[in-house]
Image (cartoon, helix red, strand yellow):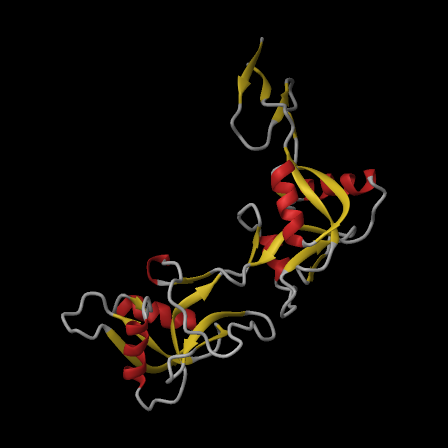
């Protein structure tokens, strides 16, 4: 006897009856638009007419994308939904959004790519830096009875190690919500000339539709190193390449999955 059952799973599939169980799953479906658009305009177009720019992570996704390219007889670069979120700054403490800013001249500049954590200098100016650099840091102590809730730690650590230290011994790395908060760090540093870590950091590469990275995507984005090339194309041979977001390319949209929304099971 065969019964039809609704399946909410993302991979809509058919389970074929018999001694050998075969599962046919439908991957993402894409369409290639041979229209030259910037990454942002391509994203807007895909979101208006479909779902979003293409997210391509699995072998099945790649096969589907390649089929979309073959249909258009196209074998060069086109935008997908991967981008470097250079403006996605937030605080380590409670993941608070950035409101007050005190950037130094031409900061943040993501110089050389990969500057994803922020230091504060003795004059209160902020600079994006490599998170792996070892620096002194300022912790925030929410639970102290003292008026001053900031603590300068004169031990050099990477940003992540500094964050761990602050969370283990205090509350978190320092958060700056106002000019008054910024001035407190200036007073704390006094004539201390070195820049120090505080709790501001940003995301790096992410998918436009906010899909979680697979390990293969994580490995691929490590090769994207352009300092101001913050949007990604994909070529016919499955290689991601970073490009200036303001350049124009053809683009892939994610049109969704098959309308098939049930499985056939043998009971």
Residue 140, placed above or below residue 2: below
Left of 200 or right of it: where is 33? right
Specify the farthest residue to the left.
145
Specify the farthest residue to the right.
73
Q: Residue at x 50, y 79 (%)?
A: 105
Total residue callouts: 0
Of residues 131 and 35, which is closer to you in this image?
Answer: 35
Of residues 162 and 227, which is closer to you in this image?
Answer: 227
Q: Position of residue 12 (x, y in %)?
A: 60, 28
Left of 127 or right of it: where is 110? right
Q: Position of residue 75 (x, y in %)?
A: 83, 49
State the image quarter where residue 52 is shown.
top right
**Residue 57 visible here:** no
Q: Residue at x 55, y 73 (%)?
A: 109
Specify the farthest residue to the top.
1
| Placement of the C terminus among the 4 image quadrants | top right
**Residue 243 visible here:** yes
| Placement of the N terminus among the 4 image quadrants | top right
Q: Position of residue 33 (x, y in %)?
A: 75, 43
State the image quarter where residue 145 is shown.
bottom left
Of residues 11 and 152, which is closer to you in this image?
Answer: 152
Residue 139, placed above or below residue 41: below
Q: Position of residue 170 (x, y in %)?
A: 25, 69
Of residues 85 and 154, which is closer to you in this image?
Answer: 85
Left of 5 or right of it: where is 27? right
Q: Residue at x 83, y 40 (%)?
A: 72
Residue 255, placed above or below residue 121: above
């Amino acid at each position: 006897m065969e019964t039809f059952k609704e399946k909410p799973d993302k991979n809509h599939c058919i389970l074929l009856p018999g001694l050998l169980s075969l599962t046919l799953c439908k991957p993402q479906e894409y369409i290639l638009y041979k229209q030259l658009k910037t990454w942002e305009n391509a994203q807007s177009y895909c979101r208006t007419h479909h779902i979003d720019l293409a997210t391509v992570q699995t072998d099945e996704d790649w096969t589907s994308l390649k089929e979309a390219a073959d249909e258009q007889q196209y074998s060069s670069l086109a935008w997908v939904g991967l981008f470097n979120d250079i403006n996605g700054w937030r605080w380590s403490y409670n993941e608070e959004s950035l409101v007050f800013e005190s950037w130094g001249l031409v900061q943040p500049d993501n110089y050389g790519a990969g500057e994803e954590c922020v230091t504060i200098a003795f004059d209160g100016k902020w600079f994006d830096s490599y998170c792996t650099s070892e620096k002194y840091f300022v912790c925030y102590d929410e639970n102290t009875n003292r008026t001053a809730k900031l603590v300068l730690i004169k031990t050099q650590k990477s940003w992540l190690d500094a964050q761990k230290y602050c969370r283990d011994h205090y509350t978190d790395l320092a958060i700056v919500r106002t000019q008054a908060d910024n001035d407190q760090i200036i007073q704390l540093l006094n004539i201390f000339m070195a820049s120090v870590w505080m709790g501001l950091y940003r995301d790096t590469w992410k998918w436009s539709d906010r899909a979680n990275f697979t390990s293969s995507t994580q490995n691929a984005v490590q090769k994207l190193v352009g300092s101001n090339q913050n949007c990604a194309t994909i070529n016919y041979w499955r290689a991601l390449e970073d490009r200036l977001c303001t350049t124009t390319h053809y683009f892939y949209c994610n049109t969704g999955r098959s309308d098939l929304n049930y499985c056939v099971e043998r009971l």
